[in-house]
Image (cartoon, rainbow, N blue to C red):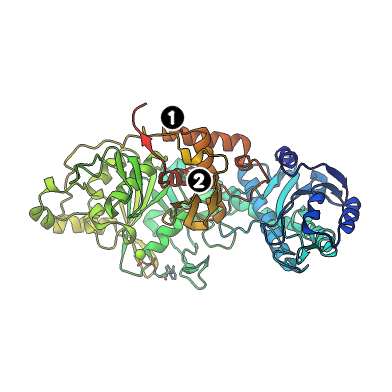
Amino acid sequence: MRDVMRRNEMKHDEIKKHGSGEDLRAALRAIDGRGYPAYKSLAGTYICPGYQLVIEHVQGDPFASPSAVGVLLSPAESGLPAWTHETKARRTVSEDVLTRAFAAAAEEVSFHAGGSGKSGLIGSSRPGQEVLERTCCHIGDDGSVTFHLRMGFPADGRRVRARSLEKMLFEFLPSIVQRSLTFGGAGEKTLRSACDLADDREAVLAALKEKGAVAFIADGSVLPRESGVSQRPLPHAVRFESPDSLAATLRLPHRGEVRGMLIRKGITLIVGGGYHGKSTILNAISLGVYPHIAGDGRELVVTDPTAVRIRSEDGRSISCTDVSPFIGHLPDGSDSVHFLSPNASGSTSQAANVSEALEAGAKTLLIDEDTSATNFMMRDALMNAVVPRESEPITPFISRIGDLKKAEVSVILVAGSFGAYFKVADTVIRMDAYRASDVTEKAKEAVRACGCEVPEAADPWHLPSFDRRPLPCRELLGDRVKMKNLGLEGFLAEREKVDLRYVGQLIDAEQSETLASCLLWLGRNAFDGKRTLRECVCLLMEKLEREGLSSLSHGTVPLIAMPREQEIFAAVDRYRRLRMQREK
Ligand code: ADP
Ligand code: MG
């Protein structure tokens, strides 16, 4: 990372300066009151007490994106002991702890220096409830810390306000760094408990594998969120407790024995009356692919990391996805093996979402009836009697769910009204006033008593084929392709919107930014009409593994966060300009 940063320095602002903090102070005083571009001369590396300061990139005017600044702490300066970063999980969570501490300390003084536009801003990444790998903070193998932040270099109108920047750089920043990026500042206790939690979560993941399970929800977890716009835990919520028949007790390295509900591989149904907490539990499982911070309530809700949330998404575009396991002969004669649509229906979009999730390596599908297309999920006997099967292109999900299970794909499905799924389910969990009970036997009994027919699929099952090959895409190959981050809505690629609103496990605007860069990288390095989409994404993942997230950018290190491979597929699949073909 240090190397990456050094490379960036060179390339970017043609940094020539190297000096001490006092050199910087003198340079700053010399440009006081001059036109704003005079700030550019400060780009450089300065040895300050406690860290090395890198002014990577200076903004063009006080209203432009704030300047990029880096802070480098040697192992002795950071004081971080080896245990804070000796596994990947620990490193990520320790970086997260430093990032949060930095955000909190910076918040106290951000904008205090005053001036026009973004003058005085001091900030960096602001993580939410999940712990993500981010470019903003990197702890090296030796315990060194590289931290990237943004600063609004202050101005009076368009004049350099040197005294204010001096205050920011020599008063505010050293105190923020001391309080957040060092072992003493971030706090041994905080780091220790974050690392313990990371270890425990890893142990749960290992237990899932060993026990053939896809999710674990520890007793005492708080699943509901404060509100539709806040991801903080709901105060006074009913805490989760596993029914005895589904409970397992795991031995975790730090918390010791933890009891909770184990959802095994296969087909799990979550049923219950409206407003009884079904969607809440599925949402918690969906986000269990990420670690959560202590106090979130979902720290020990852990899900198969490949699990993908599936929903209907009418209006989305589909490029060459094989939806034929679910969609047969369409009335307009279109080909469902290489299905193309700029405007998919509820059912075809959901079918495509399933096929694409499998292509992206999902071993668990998470589906909520609330956000599903009814005709994709079910078709009852009366309907079959009136509308003959031959004129219905859709093979409903219920007729395929058994095939998916045979293909080692598990499904967790929230069903409030589709009782027919009782017949195919391995486990049925009932939510009643937010309490879970195991009603599998009762459900099976009801099937025997009332009779229930699951319509057989007309065609034999086959896995969708994953041989789509993205063609070179002119729009991604230009000299200056403009990408604009729209946060959780997605991003723009040369004015073309990649709509990610319904990609439910995209949780951070910094991930969207990464996805935009991933698409661009794929367009420039992988899409050639010969590689399959899977091979393209594989190439990208190898690069990220090898060179790190910040290698996606050539200029200043961007503040971005790691998405999962599944979301990278989702973004590519929603880019409307991309054409794919089957044959070589
Ligand atoms: P369903 O999907 O069964 O209709 P939801 O999961 O949407 O129900 O939950 C309905 C409401 O109950 C939501 O406002 C949710 O925040 C709240 N809720 C869910 N679980 C709990 C809980 N364990 N304790 C308190 N409130 C909860
Ligand atoms: Mg619901």
Q: Is residue 227 left or right of residue 178?
A: left
Q: Quadrant of residue 107?
A: bottom right
Please say if 500 is above or below 549: below
Q: Position of residue 191 (x, y in %)?
A: 69, 54
Residue 264, relative to residue 416: is it above or below? above
User: Dot 2: what SS?
Assistant: loop
Residue 129: x, y in percent? 56, 60
Residue 545, percent across and down?
A: 58, 36
Q: What residue did someone put label 1 on?
A: 531
Tell me if residue 502 can be seen: yes
Q: Within 10 angstroms of label 1, few (less than 14), some, or many (20 or more) residues?
A: some
Between 64 and 381, the one lying in front of the other is: 64
Left or right: residue 82 versus residue 558 is right
Task: Pinpoint residue 43: horizontal percent, then vertical percent.
Answer: 79, 48
Q: Residue furthest top?
A: 584
Q: Amino acid at mark 1?
A: Arg
Which quadrant, please, contains the N terminus? top right
Ligand 2 lies under 8 Å from the Cβ of mark 1: no
User: As drawn, which residue projects farthest toward the left?
Assistant: 385
Q: Is residue 266 in view?
A: no
Could you classify mark 2 by the number of other residues whose Cα lies within 10 Å: few (under 14), some (14-19), or many (20 or more)?
Answer: some
**Where is 117 relative to 569, above or below?**
below
**Disc 2 marks which residue?**
564
